[in-house]
Image (cartoon, grey):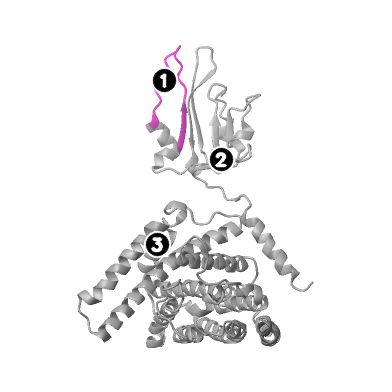
Amino acid sequence: MYGIGIIKGLFVTAKRLFMPKITQKYPEVKPDLPPRSKGSFAFNKDSCISCELCSMACPNGVIKVEWHKGADGKKRLDRYRMNLGACLFCGLCVEACPTAPIKSIQFKTLFELACWRKEDIYRIWEKQHPAEAAPEATPVAANAAEGA
Amino acid sequence: MTEFLTTVFNLIQGILGVAPTTLALALPWMDIFWAFVYFVGAVILLIINVIMLIWIERRAAGFFQERVGPNRVGPFGLLQTVNDTIKLLGKEWIMPASADRMVFLIAPLLVVTVAVTMYGLLPYGPGITPVTLNVGILFFLAVSSTNTIAVLMAGWGSNNKYSLLGGMRTVAQIISYEIPMALSIIGIVMLSGSLDLGEIARSQSHVWYVFIQPVAFVIFTISALAELTKSPFDMTEAEQEFVAGYHTEYSGIRFTLFFMGEYANLFSMAALGVVLFFGGASGPWLPPWMWFIGKTYVFILFLLWIRWTFLRIRVDKMMKFNWKFLIPVALANLLVTGVGIKLWQHFVERSI
């Protein structure tokens, strides 16, 4: 029949009117991201072996690992620092990490990285070693190394 | 709520009824006083309506597209339009160097003037018609076509090819679609036997004219959409063809006036539809003015539903549809109505 498409079209939009809305009201409702989303990083400082493979894999020099040698001659992690302001989120560090079964550095879905101050873009994980006196971390020296 | 509003209205009515005698005005001054009161009332109604309508339009557009629409400023985003208006008023208004100065400046004022005039003619209920004219519908149509001149002035005065094309198209479209609209209204006038809008509304106390004249209602709706330059007939502001049509060069408060005029016309056209086809302000339980506003808003939602469903049609097809389909159908409808009225008078009224 001539003009039946007009009626059909009207019913299509009328159905849309009462459908649930697909818009996510972002600040109130967080998006349900897939688990492998490259949001930001989770670091497990207990399983990290301070091998610095992630630091070497990183194309932008984002990761800086500070460690010292323990009494048994093994590396002990002191400080793990990421400058997310320079990070590409390429995931090469995650691929390079040799710790198993769970990698020490992993992506997590939390994506809200905006911050007010430049210092807040750094992600720093520090590990204390109560049995032996850990050498004092020197942020100034670390910053100088980063700058170079 | 209803009682509260009625109390407020009665209070205002009381104050206004006493005011001219208290001020001891002579007769001509009294007319001017009342004209001023009606003008202020129409303007207040217009502004409230425009604010509500833009919110409804944007919200409804969102809902039709499975979005949410404006929902941040104020409860349910109700203050979004106020916010936008303040933003627009704060903007610089720019005039092209080669514009026709007078024409450019007068055009937006004329649009709003026409809108306010139309608000003054509508019968909002028994005793709430600002200006009662025995040729109300004729005057309404005449004034609403004045809008064409304002649009053409804006298009011409801007000295811009897009504006001029948009203005020319608007003129062609509105003038063409006024014919089927007038023809569809003539049927109603024949049935009610009056040109007075209030009288037409009152003559529908038994049955609404939408049931007697369904073809006229369809023609009226289509041509109202074309008159309002709403989609699917929005080729005057077709963004893909010419930037924003006749108001390409306008900014700030002058653009606001065009925008206001557009939405004010939407309300007055829907109100005319309600008066002609849906019995005007009649209805049970609630006060008449509430019925009038409610019916008008339902009709506006219907127009918005059409607007957000269909695509823009091509300009030559639009003209072809008007001249080769709508006008013949409207004329045939007129003929059938006339014959029907004559037969009714001959067989039914004589036997009674």
Q: Residue B298: x percent and y percent?
A: 55, 64
Mark-to-mark CA distance, 2 and 1? 33 Å
**Quadrant of the snapshot with the N terminus of chain B:** bottom left
What is the three-letter code of the residue carrying label 1?
Pro
Q: Dot 2, crowdedness within 10 Å: few (<14), some or many (≥20)? A: some
Is tag 2's residue or tag 1's residue first in the polypeptide sequence? 2
Choose between B272 and B263: the one closer to the eye: B272
Tell which residue pokes out farthest to the front in this image. Answer: B352
Q: Tell me the quarter of the picture where residue A88 sits.
A: top right
Instruction: Check disc 3 and give the amino acid type.
Output: Val
Q: Which residue is mark 3?
A: B82
Give neighbour class at mark 1: few <14, some 14-19, many 20+ (Cα, 10 Å).
few
Is A134 part of what is drawn in magenta?
A: yes
Q: Nearer the viewer, residue B55 or B15?
A: B15
- Mark identifier at residue B69: none
The magenta span reads A122-139
Q: As rendered, which of B66 and B121 lies closer to the eye?
A: B121
The image quadrant that residue B278 belongs to is: bottom right
CA–CA distance between discs 2 and 3? 38 Å
Look at the numbered disc 2 and give the secondary structure of its residue. Answer: loop
Residue A135: give its label.
1
Q: Quadrant of residue B64?
A: bottom right
Label 2 chain ID? A
Secondary structure under tag 3 reads helix
Q: Which residue is mark 2?
A: A39
Which of discs 2 and 1 lies nearer the camera? The answer is 2
Name the quadrant of the C terminus of chain B: bottom right
Q: Nearer the viewer, residue B272 or B188?
A: B188
